[in-house]
Image (tube, rainbow, N blue to C red):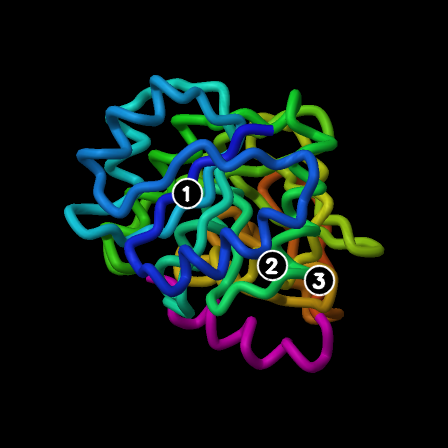
């Protein structure tokens, strides 16, 4: 696979090159620290995968990919611990690695890309979600989320999600159009993303969108507008009641 690197720190770039030269199926075809250079080279070199730092010398990689448009490559983002960057990448269902990059994590993610390269091409809608959320810095963030199932990636407005149910490391999203989407991530992965937008964890296995709550039963259940009954754990009962009392 042909690989291109977007990184503006020389020390990190050299570290990445040392790791990549040990991987037989990887051919590094170029690197850039600026959007201007990368925007010219990437369409010409046609890499299969790009390792991309978010912040570059003259802009950000979200901006770069928006300029390039639809393309047949995969992206692994590289980021220092940045709450908003990580949340943005999760919103867009992108793979990412935290700096400092370790050899095992990078090799493992590249192996995954190599074996799924026909299924994981770059998606501009995913980019739009991630970039909107990143630029909003968590205040007026994009109200859409990318849900990655085995067969497809679906862009879903958060307001369309009635509730989420987890089971054995998987999460099912129940939507207001009566469809369900199963993703291979646990509920915890989505809790921090959805809670700021009117969702509440009412049970170990359930996260509900309170705009769809129709009735609370004192036995410990919420009736949703789609008539589904969602359990409320005894530990979460007081929090649920406080939430209901504050609805105007």
Residue that mark 2 sits on = 189
Q: Exactly how many numbered labels are in the figure?
A: 3
Question: Which residue is disc 3 drawn over?
Answer: 221
Percent position of residue 235, x then y: 69, 81
* Residue at horizontal 54 percent and vertical 74 percent from the top: 241
Q: Earlier in the sequence, mark 3 or mark 2?
A: 2
> Disc number at residue 28?
none
Q: The magenta stretch spans which residues?
A: 233-248
Mark 3 touching mark 2, by CB under 8 A?
no
Q: Are marks 1 and 3 in contact (CB under 8 Å)?
A: no
- Marks 3, 2: nearer the viewer: 2
Kindly identify the residue that appears in the image at 78 percent across and 55 percent down.
169
Compared with 159, 134 (above or below) is below
Question: Looking at the image, which is closer to me, 97 or 24?
Answer: 24
In the visual, does 71 lie left or right of 26?
A: left
Q: Tell whether position 242 is magenta.
A: yes
Identify the residue position indicated by label 1 in the image: 5
Q: Which percent across, then down, holds residue 108?
A: 70, 51
Indicate left or right for 185 with 162 as reference. Answer: right
Within the magenta stretch, is there residue 57?
A: no
């Amino acid at each position: 696979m042909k690989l291109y690197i977007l990184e503006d720190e020389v020390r990190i770039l050299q570290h990445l090159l040392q790791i990549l030269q040990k991987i037989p199926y990887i051919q590094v075809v170029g690197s850039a620290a600026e959007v201007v250079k990368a925007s010219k080279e990437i369409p010409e070199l046609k890499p299969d995968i790009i390792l991309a730092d978010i912040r570059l010398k003259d802009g950000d990689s979200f901006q770069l990919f928006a300029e390039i448009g639809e393309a047949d490559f995969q992206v692994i983002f590289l980021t220092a611990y940045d709450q908003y960057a990580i949340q943005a990448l999760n919103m867009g269902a992108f793979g990412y690695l935290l700096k400092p990059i370790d050899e095992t994590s990078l090799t493992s993610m590249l192996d995954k890309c190599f074996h799924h390269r026909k299924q994981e091409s770059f998606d501009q809608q995913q980019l739009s979600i991630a970039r909107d959320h990143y630029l909003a810095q968590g205040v007026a963030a994009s109200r859409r989320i990318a849900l990655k199932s085995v067969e497809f990636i679906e862009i879903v407005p958060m307001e369309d999600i009635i509730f989420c149910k987890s089971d054995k490391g998987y999460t099912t999203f129940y939507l207001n159009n009566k469809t369900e989407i199963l993703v291979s991530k646990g509920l915890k992965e989505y809790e921090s993303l959805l809670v700021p937008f009117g969702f509440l964890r009412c049970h170990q296995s359930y996260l509900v969108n309170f705009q769809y709550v129709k009735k609370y039963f004192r036995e410990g259940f919420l009736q949703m507008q789609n008539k589904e009954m969602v359990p409320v754990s005894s530990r979460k009962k007081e929090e649920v009641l406080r939430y209901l009392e504050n609805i105007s």
